[in-house]
Amino acid sequence: MSHSQHNHIHDYKDVKDRNLLISIFLNILITAAQIIGGIISGSLALLSDALHNFSDVISLVVSYVASKLSKRKASINRTFGYKRAEILAAFINAATLIIVAILLIIEAVKRFQDPQEIESNLVIWLSLIAIFANGLSVLLLKKESKNNINIRSAYLHLLTDMLASVAVLIGGLLMKYYLLFWVDSVLTFLIAMYLIIVGYDLLKTSTKMLMLFTPDHINIKEVVRIVNQLPKVKKLHHVHIWNLSDDELHLEAHLDLEENITTQEFNILLVDIERVLHDTFNINHVTIQPEYKKEDPKEIIVQD
């Protein structure tokens, strides 16, 4: 890696952390304002939005800590360093989204059975403030969310909260001009259902990564087929492919050879294997165990 590339990555991570800190500060202010406003106005939707904002604060703090940990160097006791910290953060954030959503549904059902009059003006103004602040946070994290599951989990928290605030605003207007106070409960329920849908998808993705499942976009049989076409290769087997982190895709396998080649010849072959795996599947860490006439299972997948 060149010096300029290293500086670019370092600068990118610094910007990412700075944007997370700004988002944390904005969401602390929103949460405090909405809790006070929700109590004064009596709006469950506003309080539910505040609860979701509080979960945003937690998720952003978790994401920030994980981002900092992921930069720590590997050591004898931690040979991978803390590279998987961001995946763990995404899992925690997804789980909190679902838990918050379930709590909101329970409260929404209770309030729907007993609608209460709500101070709609306060709801409208606070929801507008939340839309602006969350919208700014969403814009700050949008670019990084495309390439990092940890930032994506925080981004989804903020995006859903911005949409929730839009729903609260609509509810406030309906309550103000049409006195439809039951809308508060309905909107809370809809917000919660959306949180479950978004949270489940992120929870599933992060769980697969933590369990070292083969990434969805990888076809192991196709990987084997392409490697087997290379000269001197008899069969790739005992294959494992997993994400260590968002930007590290690992392959570990045994390679049965057609000939009893030298170590130097194998090094040349390994370069070809690494190139074709990177160019075709974006696999950037390859560990191969070379074999010649070794008596062991030659299946693609073997339970170790």
Image: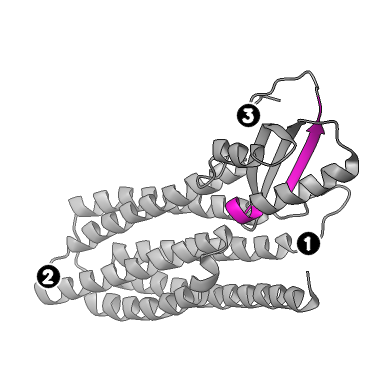
The residues bearing labels 1 and 2 have C-alpha atoms spaced at a distance of 55 Å
The stretch of residues the image draws in magenta is 278-292
User: Which residue is label 1 attached to?
Assistant: 72
Q: Vertical placement of 120 versus 45: above or below?
A: below
The residues bearing labels 2 and 3 have C-alpha atoms spaced at a distance of 65 Å
Please identify, in this view, whether the residue under mark 1 or under mark 2 is nearer the observer: 1
Where residue 83 appears, as percent x and y from the top left, is 71, 55
- Residue 248, quarter of picture: bottom right
Is 58 in the magenta? no
Residue 22 in view here? yes
User: Which residue is label 2 attached to?
Assistant: 179
Q: Earlier in the sequence, mark 1 or mark 2?
A: 1
Where residue 194 appears, as percent x and y from the top left, is 33, 55
Horizontal side of 168 relative to 268 (left or right) equals left
Q: Earlier in the sequence, mark 3 or mark 1?
A: 1
Where residue 137 appears, as percent x and y from the top left, is 48, 76
The kind of residue tagged 3 is Ile
Q: Earlier in the sequence, mark 2 or mark 3?
A: 2
User: Which residue is label 3 attached to?
Assistant: 300
Please identify, in this view, whether the residue under mark 3 or under mark 1 is nearer the observer: 3
Where residue 156 appears, as percent x and y from the top left, is 45, 62
Image point (12%, 70%), residue name:
179
